[in-house]
Image: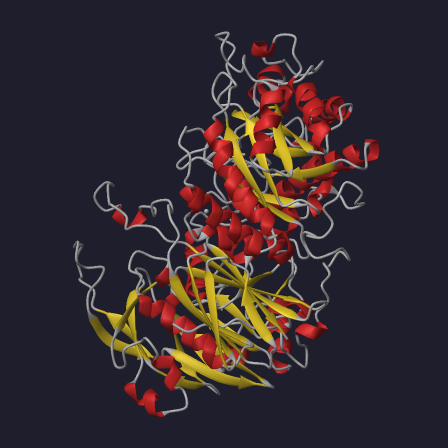
Amino acid sequence: MSKNLSRRTLLKVATGAATLAGVGIGDMPLMGRDGSDFRINPDSVSAGSNLPWYRQRLVGIEVGPSGANDEDSAFYSRVSGKEIVENLLKAKVEYAVIFMKDQSFAYYNSKIVRKCPGLGERDLLREVLDEAGKHNLPIVAYCQIQYDTSVWQAHPAWRMEDWQGNSIASRLCYNSEYLQYTKQVAAEMMEYGIAGFHFDMLDFGFSHPYGCFCETNCQPRFREQYGTEMPRPANPTWDESWEKILNFRANSNTRFCQELQQFVHSKRPDISVDFNYHGYPPFSWIEGELPVKHAMNGDFVTAEGLPWIFGYNNPSFLSLFLAGARLGGPIQVATSRSMYDYFDPTIRPVADMLWESSTYLAHGAQVTFVDKIRYDGTQDPLVYERIGKVFGAARSKKEYVGRRPVHEVGLYYSSRSRDWFARDEPMRYMQAFYGAHKALLETHVTTGMIMDENASLERLKEFPVVYVPNAAILTGQEVSLFEKYVSAGGNLLITGLSGLYDYYGREQNDCSLSGLTGTRFTRTIPEPHNNYIRLPGALKQAERSGLLEGVPADWPMLVSGPMAVFESGTAQPFGELIAAYHLPVESPFGHMLSPQTVLGPAVFINRYGKGNVVSVACSPDAAFAGDYRMPEHRNLIRNLIRYLNPNPPVLVEAPLNVEVVVASDEASKQFLVHLICFSSPPTAVAAPFGKGKLVLSPPMEQPMRYEANVKITRPFLKAHAIGKNTQTFRNGNQVKLITVEIHDVLIVDL
């Protein structure tokens, strides 16, 4: 994974079943879309199981070196396969990933890759496998692809080249003979008893220059595929020729992965193959991966959580994104035992790692912690002692994870908007998506993610509400899907500039969603988008009084983010979109002035067929993930969801820092309500002036006592929590919990 970003490389609630057009949880099969058991099968972990290891096992550790050096005799000279396995067992792992080929060395007896000098005559892979075999512990071999500097130096014809024909440092062309070289390396390791390969760093770079225009490999293949010369623009042109370049990159990456996987399976069908994935936010077209296309490479998809890079909402966000990108699973998330970087010698508190791993597991993902061991190859026993406590707790809850998720809202992700609207500024689109997830997370509205690449009417109908945050580019096919979904009784929430840009990211004269929203587009508001909305106090007396819960009436609320002006057609408008004053000259105060002019309605409600559409002319979601976020942004989003879906089967009242995940078990006729609590002391701002908003939360050190109320809106027999430190009290159709558990599960027998 990235050497630049990392070594492995961002109130009342409700949770609902997919109850649309007569479909309830009892009708939803507990199967993946590939016909396999949904995600991880918690009942199949045994030596005699026919399922592959990644469908049985929940928790593992990746072990690798800190650095790579042949200038001294110390680097990795004291590493021991026996010590590695002994520590893995202390940590209660169920599988392990061990570095065997990185940017400089092999750590086994290779005839192709230069072996790490510090190992001498020893074969680390043999040592690890001999010890692991005694304990039925699957060992996955780590193999680095990009940033392989040893190969880059030895084979100039395999290098990526920029548009001018200059070699790009340490990057290798996917269309070169490097693929054959990698197959030879894999063939060597397949002679050992490994359980799988983890191939790392499948990207086109994380910064300029990116992509490959090499004359030796890419240009001939491009000419063969498209019947024309490969354009070599100095900068993106955002036209038909640029689309061919982006497609060519994505296809080159996928071809490399698929051919490598096919080669491995042709030799050893029992060996798993996975590739480190960079199709998720904040990554974009620059890395050359698409959310669904590249999540489908490998036997499962694995990506990096890393709260210290991507923030403390990311474990939830990433789990949901992976599940939406690879429908039916399996999915895996990797994170670090260190607090600030893969290579620092710090160790996270047990509570912090337990919270993160519990989040992944509740969402049905495997968890891998990465340990970069000491420079000389020895290990820190405290790392494995702490992870052992985390994994012991995780394994004790194995029977409660991997069930069918029950989601109320489907959050719609537009990769086309990511690439062609946001272009070189990913947050121009992704900020609204991040903010939408954050608002739903904090108000305990259970959420799944829908990808434009695999969207279907069947997929949309799994959700009572589909939420489209600032998806500027929506094709005619997507709009047609939304129309069919709403006509059948679905509910749609739309925000920001959704539908206002064409296929190539150019602003249109009309909105492609006008028929659904019942509005007429007037104009977009030029940046900076720091304007206001105001909701009338008269709503308190109307049937829409819930729209003001937690949002002051008749108050101009700053909403920083994309917005446009619309007129009402068939829709019922309410509220006001208000422009701010703007100074005619540059001023440090001129970007955030008070409200001035009413531009048009703020919110529109339109009946369409059997369903409803709510459209918001601004982006409270983008605002809630921005520098000027306020609780009222979150509350407005919650209120709009609750207006569209007022009576989901499970409603939870809990602190904002408690995540709620609901699953159903048809065989046992149960709801499983996961409650995962993150608690941390306030942040001390020790950042450069103006950067205080970006400071991360401190790691979590201890659990927090809290109360939660769970309302079940259908008849049920009984309910109990699995936590030893949890008290439950039933009052009619509500269950009150008092707990100090970081992760607890309320079992509701229906």
Q: Residue at x 44, y 53 (%)?
A: 313
**Taking 560 as reference, is 394 above or below it?**
above
Q: Residue at x 58, y 9 (%)?
A: 117
From this viewpoint, is residue 615 visible? yes
Q: Quadrant of residue 670?
A: bottom right
Q: In the rendered picture of this protein, how many numbered marks are placed on residues?
A: 0
Which quarter of the rendered picture does the N terminus lie within? top right
Is 319 on the left or on the right of 680, as rendered? right
From this viewpoint, is residue 7 visible? no
Q: Quadrant of residue 123?
A: top right
**Taking 558 as reference, is 488 above or below it?**
below
Q: Quadrant of residue 102?
A: top right
Q: Position of residue 21 (x, y in %)?
A: 66, 81
Q: Residue at x 54, y 14 (%)?
A: 78
Q: Nearer the viewer, residue 141 or 412?
A: 141
Q: Position of residue 500 (x, y in %)?
A: 48, 67
Which quarter of the rendered picture does the C terminus lie within? bottom right
Q: Nearer the viewer, residue 635 or 731?
A: 731
Is 223 on the left or on the right of 239, as rendered? right
Colour mapping used in the image? secondary structure
Q: Position of residue 374 (x, y in %)?
A: 47, 21
User: What residue occupies the far bottom of the structure in this picture?
Assistant: 541
Is 298 on the left or on the right of 556, as rendered? right
Q: Nearer the viewer, residue 126 or 620?
A: 126
Q: Residue at x 67, y 21 (%)?
A: 125
Q: Nearer the viewer, residue 29 or 144?
A: 29
Q: Position of residue 491 (x, y in %)?
A: 55, 78
